[in-house]
Amino acid sequence: MSCQRMNNLVHAYLDDELSLTEQVQFEQHIATCPECEAAHRAFKKLRQNLRDCSLRFDMPTAMSEKLSNSIPKPADSKPHEFPGYRVLAIAAMLMIVLGGVSMWVMHANRSNAVRDLVDAHVRSLQADHLLDVVSTDQHTVKPWFDGRIDFAPPVKDLTADGFPLQGGRLDYLRNHAVAALVYQRAKHTINLFVWPEQGTDESVKGSTVDGYNVLEWREAGMRQIAVSDLNMQEMQEFASLERSATSPKPEPTSR
Protein backbone atom coordinates (compact mmCIF):
# COMPACT_ATOMS: atom_id res chain seq x y z
CA MET A 1 0.00 0.00 0.00
CA SER A 2 1.36 3.41 -0.99
CA CYS A 3 1.57 6.38 1.39
CA GLN A 4 -1.00 8.23 -0.74
CA ARG A 5 -3.40 5.29 -0.51
CA MET A 6 -2.85 5.21 3.26
CA ASN A 7 -3.75 8.91 3.54
CA ASN A 8 -6.96 8.26 1.59
CA LEU A 9 -7.97 5.42 3.94
CA VAL A 10 -6.92 6.77 7.34
CA HIS A 11 -10.35 8.23 8.21
CA ALA A 12 -12.16 5.08 7.05
CA TYR A 13 -9.76 3.05 9.21
CA LEU A 14 -10.50 5.18 12.27
CA ASP A 15 -14.24 4.75 11.60
CA ASP A 16 -13.92 0.94 11.20
CA GLU A 17 -15.20 1.14 7.63
CA LEU A 18 -12.42 -0.80 5.88
CA SER A 19 -12.70 -4.36 4.68
CA LEU A 20 -10.61 -6.95 6.50
CA THR A 21 -8.08 -7.03 3.66
CA GLU A 22 -7.74 -3.24 3.58
CA GLN A 23 -7.44 -3.11 7.38
CA VAL A 24 -4.61 -5.65 7.36
CA GLN A 25 -2.81 -3.82 4.54
CA PHE A 26 -3.24 -0.50 6.35
CA GLU A 27 -1.82 -1.85 9.62
CA GLN A 28 1.07 -3.53 7.83
CA HIS A 29 1.92 -0.25 6.11
CA ILE A 30 1.94 1.97 9.21
CA ALA A 31 4.00 -0.69 11.01
CA THR A 32 6.80 -0.17 8.47
CA CYS A 33 6.38 3.53 7.62
CA PRO A 34 7.18 5.95 10.49
CA GLU A 35 5.78 8.98 8.64
CA CYS A 36 2.40 7.35 7.99
CA GLU A 37 2.29 5.95 11.53
CA ALA A 38 2.87 9.47 12.88
CA ALA A 39 0.12 10.84 10.62
CA HIS A 40 -2.24 8.13 11.84
CA ARG A 41 -1.51 8.99 15.48
CA ALA A 42 -2.02 12.70 14.75
CA PHE A 43 -5.44 12.10 13.17
CA LYS A 44 -6.43 9.84 16.04
CA LYS A 45 -5.38 12.46 18.61
CA LEU A 46 -7.25 15.18 16.73
CA ARG A 47 -10.46 13.14 16.77
CA GLN A 48 -10.10 12.58 20.52
CA ASN A 49 -9.55 16.30 21.12
CA LEU A 50 -12.60 17.23 19.07
CA ARG A 51 -14.73 15.02 21.30
CA ASP A 52 -13.45 16.84 24.39
CA CYS A 53 -16.30 18.66 26.14
CA SER A 54 -13.94 21.46 27.14
CA LEU A 55 -13.92 22.61 23.50
CA ARG A 56 -17.64 23.31 23.63
CA PHE A 57 -19.20 26.48 25.00
CA ASP A 58 -22.62 28.05 25.32
CA MET A 59 -23.38 31.27 23.51
CA PRO A 60 -23.59 34.23 25.90
CA THR A 61 -27.16 35.31 26.64
CA ALA A 62 -26.59 38.85 25.37
CA MET A 63 -25.25 37.60 22.03
CA SER A 64 -28.11 35.12 21.67
CA GLU A 65 -30.70 37.87 22.26
CA LYS A 66 -28.90 40.20 19.83
CA LEU A 67 -28.93 37.60 17.09
CA SER A 68 -32.58 36.80 17.75
CA ASN A 69 -33.58 40.49 17.61
CA SER A 70 -31.62 41.01 14.38
CA ILE A 71 -33.80 38.55 12.46
CA PRO A 72 -36.75 40.42 10.92
CA LYS A 73 -40.16 38.99 11.74
CA PRO A 74 -43.14 39.45 9.37
CA ALA A 75 -45.69 41.69 11.02
CA ASP A 76 -48.81 39.67 10.23
CA SER A 77 -47.46 36.14 10.12
CA LYS A 78 -48.16 33.60 12.83
CA PRO A 79 -45.41 31.42 14.29
CA HIS A 80 -44.64 28.41 12.13
CA GLU A 81 -46.92 29.69 9.37
CA PHE A 82 -45.36 29.90 5.90
CA PRO A 83 -46.89 31.25 2.71
CA GLY A 84 -47.44 28.62 0.03
CA TYR A 85 -44.67 29.88 -2.24
CA ARG A 86 -42.16 29.54 0.61
CA VAL A 87 -43.17 25.94 1.17
CA LEU A 88 -42.69 25.21 -2.52
CA ALA A 89 -39.33 26.96 -2.54
CA ILE A 90 -38.14 24.99 0.49
CA ALA A 91 -39.35 21.73 -1.08
CA ALA A 92 -37.51 22.56 -4.32
CA MET A 93 -34.32 23.36 -2.42
CA LEU A 94 -34.56 20.09 -0.49
CA MET A 95 -35.00 18.15 -3.73
CA ILE A 96 -31.92 19.83 -5.22
CA VAL A 97 -29.86 19.16 -2.09
CA LEU A 98 -30.99 15.54 -1.83
CA GLY A 99 -30.32 15.03 -5.53
CA GLY A 100 -26.83 16.45 -5.14
CA VAL A 101 -26.14 14.27 -2.11
CA SER A 102 -27.40 11.21 -3.96
CA MET A 103 -25.13 11.93 -6.93
CA TRP A 104 -22.17 12.48 -4.62
CA VAL A 105 -22.81 9.20 -2.80
CA MET A 106 -23.07 7.32 -6.10
CA HIS A 107 -19.82 8.88 -7.32
CA ALA A 108 -18.06 8.09 -4.03
CA ASN A 109 -19.27 4.48 -4.12
CA ARG A 110 -18.12 4.11 -7.73
CA SER A 111 -14.70 5.57 -6.89
CA ASN A 112 -14.34 3.24 -3.91
CA ALA A 113 -15.35 0.25 -6.05
CA VAL A 114 -12.70 1.11 -8.64
CA ARG A 115 -10.05 1.37 -5.91
CA ASP A 116 -11.14 -2.01 -4.52
CA LEU A 117 -10.73 -3.57 -7.96
CA VAL A 118 -7.28 -2.03 -8.39
CA ASP A 119 -6.38 -3.63 -5.05
CA ALA A 120 -7.83 -6.93 -6.31
CA HIS A 121 -5.71 -6.66 -9.47
CA VAL A 122 -2.56 -6.14 -7.39
CA ARG A 123 -3.44 -9.02 -5.05
CA SER A 124 -3.99 -11.37 -7.98
CA LEU A 125 -0.45 -10.70 -9.19
CA GLN A 126 1.23 -10.83 -5.78
CA ALA A 127 -0.59 -13.76 -4.18
CA ASP A 128 -0.08 -16.12 -7.12
CA HIS A 129 -3.84 -16.49 -7.50
CA LEU A 130 -4.36 -15.01 -10.92
CA LEU A 131 -6.28 -17.93 -12.46
CA ASP A 132 -8.80 -20.48 -11.23
CA VAL A 133 -9.29 -21.84 -14.73
CA VAL A 134 -6.32 -21.77 -17.11
CA SER A 135 -7.33 -21.82 -20.77
CA THR A 136 -7.07 -19.75 -23.92
CA ASP A 137 -10.36 -21.23 -25.14
CA GLN A 138 -13.38 -19.04 -24.44
CA HIS A 139 -15.60 -22.14 -24.70
CA THR A 140 -13.71 -23.61 -21.73
CA VAL A 141 -13.51 -20.47 -19.60
CA LYS A 142 -17.15 -19.38 -19.89
CA PRO A 143 -18.71 -22.74 -18.85
CA TRP A 144 -16.33 -22.86 -15.87
CA PHE A 145 -18.33 -20.03 -14.26
CA ASP A 146 -21.59 -22.02 -14.51
CA GLY A 147 -22.85 -22.80 -11.00
CA ARG A 148 -20.21 -20.58 -9.40
CA ILE A 149 -21.92 -17.26 -10.14
CA ASP A 150 -25.53 -16.46 -11.03
CA PHE A 151 -24.77 -14.81 -14.38
CA ALA A 152 -22.95 -15.66 -17.59
CA PRO A 153 -20.06 -13.26 -18.26
CA PRO A 154 -19.25 -12.47 -21.90
CA VAL A 155 -15.92 -14.22 -22.60
CA LYS A 156 -14.07 -13.30 -25.78
CA ASP A 157 -10.74 -14.51 -27.13
CA LEU A 158 -8.86 -11.59 -28.64
CA THR A 159 -5.72 -13.53 -29.55
CA ALA A 160 -5.89 -12.47 -33.18
CA ASP A 161 -5.93 -8.84 -32.03
CA GLY A 162 -2.94 -9.19 -29.73
CA PHE A 163 -4.79 -9.67 -26.43
CA PRO A 164 -4.84 -13.45 -25.84
CA LEU A 165 -7.20 -14.83 -23.22
CA GLN A 166 -5.37 -16.54 -20.34
CA GLY A 167 -8.30 -17.80 -18.28
CA GLY A 168 -10.44 -16.55 -15.41
CA ARG A 169 -11.20 -16.69 -11.71
CA LEU A 170 -13.78 -15.73 -9.13
CA ASP A 171 -13.18 -12.46 -7.31
CA TYR A 172 -15.23 -10.44 -4.85
CA LEU A 173 -16.37 -6.82 -4.68
CA ARG A 174 -18.17 -5.71 -1.50
CA ASN A 175 -18.90 -9.36 -0.62
CA HIS A 176 -20.44 -10.03 -4.04
CA ALA A 177 -18.91 -12.49 -6.49
CA VAL A 178 -17.69 -11.05 -9.79
CA ALA A 179 -16.08 -12.71 -12.80
CA ALA A 180 -12.44 -11.81 -13.44
CA LEU A 181 -11.28 -12.52 -17.00
CA VAL A 182 -7.53 -12.39 -17.53
CA TYR A 183 -5.91 -11.20 -20.75
CA GLN A 184 -2.28 -10.66 -21.72
CA ARG A 185 -0.56 -7.97 -23.77
CA ALA A 186 3.18 -8.66 -24.11
CA LYS A 187 4.29 -8.83 -20.45
CA HIS A 188 1.29 -6.88 -19.14
CA THR A 189 -1.68 -8.55 -17.44
CA ILE A 190 -5.19 -7.17 -17.84
CA ASN A 191 -7.88 -8.06 -15.31
CA LEU A 192 -11.38 -7.54 -16.72
CA PHE A 193 -13.96 -7.58 -13.91
CA VAL A 194 -17.55 -8.27 -14.98
CA TRP A 195 -20.87 -8.35 -13.10
CA PRO A 196 -24.54 -7.60 -13.90
CA GLU A 197 -25.72 -4.01 -13.56
CA GLN A 198 -29.01 -2.60 -14.76
CA GLY A 199 -29.08 0.60 -16.79
CA THR A 200 -28.48 1.95 -20.23
CA ASP A 201 -25.20 1.37 -22.04
CA GLU A 202 -22.36 3.74 -21.11
CA SER A 203 -19.32 4.81 -23.09
CA VAL A 204 -15.81 3.96 -21.90
CA LYS A 205 -14.47 6.14 -19.09
CA GLY A 206 -10.79 6.13 -18.20
CA SER A 207 -8.89 6.95 -15.01
CA THR A 208 -5.59 6.24 -13.29
CA VAL A 209 -5.49 4.89 -9.73
CA ASP A 210 -2.22 4.34 -7.88
CA GLY A 211 -0.37 4.20 -11.20
CA TYR A 212 -2.73 1.64 -12.78
CA ASN A 213 -4.89 2.48 -15.79
CA VAL A 214 -8.60 1.75 -15.40
CA LEU A 215 -11.33 1.67 -18.04
CA GLU A 216 -14.98 1.11 -17.19
CA TRP A 217 -18.17 0.87 -19.17
CA ARG A 218 -21.62 -0.73 -19.10
CA GLU A 219 -22.96 -2.74 -22.00
CA ALA A 220 -25.76 -5.27 -22.46
CA GLY A 221 -26.60 -5.20 -18.73
CA MET A 222 -23.00 -5.84 -17.63
CA ARG A 223 -20.63 -3.52 -15.80
CA GLN A 224 -17.08 -4.12 -17.03
CA ILE A 225 -13.93 -2.63 -15.50
CA ALA A 226 -10.48 -3.34 -16.94
CA VAL A 227 -7.36 -2.76 -14.80
CA SER A 228 -3.72 -3.00 -15.90
CA ASP A 229 -0.35 -1.25 -15.91
CA LEU A 230 -0.58 -1.30 -19.71
CA ASN A 231 -0.45 2.15 -21.31
CA MET A 232 -3.78 3.93 -21.77
CA GLN A 233 -3.69 3.87 -25.58
CA GLU A 234 -3.49 0.07 -25.73
CA MET A 235 -6.04 -0.20 -22.91
CA GLN A 236 -8.44 1.86 -25.04
CA GLU A 237 -7.77 -0.51 -27.94
CA PHE A 238 -8.56 -3.47 -25.66
CA ALA A 239 -11.83 -1.90 -24.50
CA SER A 240 -12.84 -1.13 -28.08
CA LEU A 241 -12.23 -4.74 -29.09
CA GLU A 242 -14.18 -6.05 -26.08
CA ARG A 243 -17.15 -3.81 -26.84
CA SER A 244 -17.21 -4.67 -30.55
CA ALA A 245 -16.95 -8.37 -29.69
CA THR A 246 -19.80 -8.09 -27.17
CA SER A 247 -22.13 -5.98 -29.30
CA PRO A 248 -24.81 -8.00 -31.10
CA LYS A 249 -24.13 -8.53 -34.79
CA PRO A 250 -26.74 -7.12 -37.19
CA GLU A 251 -29.08 -9.63 -38.79
CA PRO A 252 -28.43 -10.19 -42.52
CA THR A 253 -31.00 -8.54 -44.75
CA SER A 254 -32.84 -10.63 -47.28
CA ARG A 255 -33.01 -9.51 -50.84
Image (spheres, grey):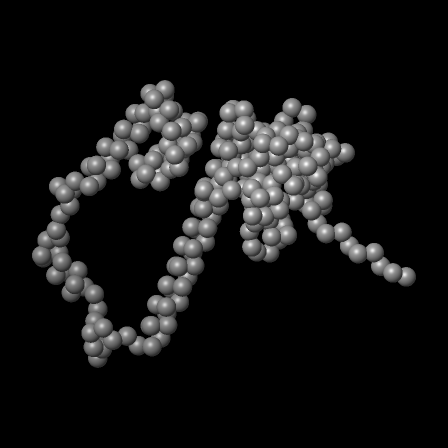
* 195 vs 105, nearest the viewer: 195
Quadrant of the drawing holding the N terminus: top left
Residue 237: image x %, image y %? 69, 37
Query: What residue do we see at 38% from left, 37% from top?
Result: 18
Q: Residue furthest right?
A: 255
Residue 206 seen anywhere in this rendered image of the structure? no
Query: What residue do we see at 59% from left, 48% from top?
Result: 151
Q: Residue furthest front?
A: 147
* 115 vs 222, nearest the viewer: 222
Residue 101 seen anywhere in this rendered image of the structure? yes
Residue 56: image x %, image y %? 15, 45
Tell me if 161 is positioned left or right of 20 in this view.
right
Tell me if 131 is positioned left or right of 95 in this view.
right
Residue 164: image x %, image y %? 70, 31
Asked if 187 appears above or below 114 in the picture, the reply is above
Residue 134: image x %, image y %? 64, 30
Quadrant of the drawing holding the C terminus: bottom right
Asked if 188 appears above or below 93 in the picture, the reply is above
* 229 vs 139, nearest the viewer: 139
Write down the quadrant of residue 46 in the picture: top left
Asked if 121 appears above or below 95 in the picture, the reply is above
Asked if 44 appears above or below 203 in the picture, the reply is above
Write down the quadrant of residue 169 in the picture: top right
Query: What residue do we see at 72% from left, 44% from top?
Result: 245
